[in-house]
Amino acid sequence: MLRRILPMILILALRAAPLCAATIVIPPGEFKKASQELGGAVAYRNVAPASALGVGGFDLGADVSAMDISSSYQIDNSSYARLYMTRARARVGLPWGVTVGGMLGWSPNTLTKMYGLEVGKEILSDGVVTPALGIRGTYSRLGGLDGLSLYSWGGDVTVSKKILFLTPYVGLGLQWINSAFTALPRQEFRQMRYFGGLQIIPFPLLRVTAEVEREVKWAYTLKVGVGF
């Protein structure tokens, strides 16, 4: 059943994303700043506690993020104070505490598109006293903007502790960003990410997660999914 559900989610995400590309205008001297903000927008957000899913476990969901951005650059002749991003995502548990996943997303207000992959490893299980500790590597890429190529590699560490049906978590990560735009010099840099969230399981299989992140700007994410 899981093999059928995963392709369906990815196909729906692709169909929902617009096929046309948007134009982006970046003022002289603002390319590094724009790359930092868009790099933060494309960062792979797991929106989940540190615990592994376990063999046969899965997590299917959709989320929406809102991120503050600068108005110094324009997308399709419009300036935005906030970038919205919707995503469909899927994660599957493997042996040895490993979890793999992927996501597809697009921005309803700017036509920006993105996709990404993740591989996580549980280092410490959530016990009676001890919290869960996990590490993760990610790759994500931004698309849908004419002339702009931006992708990133990342790594982060997350700590979480389950308390009844609530699981708060905090984490930090480092993101390496590579950005190129028309004839401008390529930008390559890294930046830190700090995040925290709360997962709520009000009913079996249902998961609702809220997360706040600070990279260059603040980002807020709400995710709804099913899994075990």
Image (cartoon, rainbow, N blue to C red):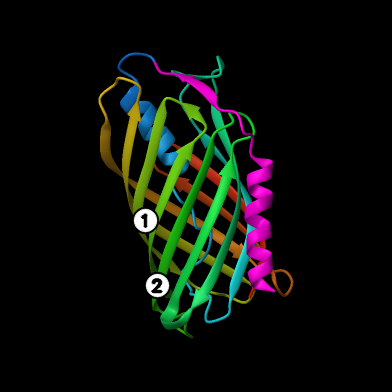
Residue 202 position by quadrant: bottom right
Q: Is residue 165 visible?
A: yes
The amino acid type of the residue labelled 2 equals: Lys
Instruction: Give the residue at x 55% y 24%.
Output: 22
Q: Amino acid at mark 1?
A: Leu
Q: Position of residue 124 (x, y in %)?
A: 39, 79
Q: Earlier in the sequence, mark 2 or mark 1?
A: 2
Is label 2 in a helix, a strand or a loop?
strand
Q: Is residue 13 magenta?
A: yes
Query: Which stretch is magenta?
Result: 1-26
Residue 39, x across and y down, in percent: 40, 38
The circle drawn on residue 15 is none
- Horizontal side of residue 73 vs 64, given as left or right: left
Front residue of 222 and 175: 175
Q: Is residue 130 visible?
A: no
Determine the residue located farthest toward the bottom in the rendered image: 128
Q: CA distance from mark 2 to mark 1?
A: 15 Å
The x and y percentages for residue 79 are: 54, 18
Quarter of the image with the N terminus in it: bottom right
- How crowded is the residue under tag 2: few (<14 C-alpha within 10 Å), some, or many (20+)? many
User: Which residue is pictured at 37% across the width and 56% down the height?
Assistant: 172
What residue is shown with label 2? 121
> At 55% across and 66% down in the image, what residue appears?
91
In which quadrant is the C terminus drawn? Answer: bottom right
Count neighbours of disc 1 (C-alpha within 10 A) and say few if under 14, some if 14 to 19, many if 20 or more: some
Q: Is residue 60 above or below residue 38?
A: below
Residue at position x 55%, y 44% in the image: 220
Residue wearing tag 1: 172
Query: Residue 173 vs residue 102: left or right?
Result: left
- Is label 2 or label 1 in front? 2
Q: Is label 1 in a helix, a strand or a loop?
A: strand
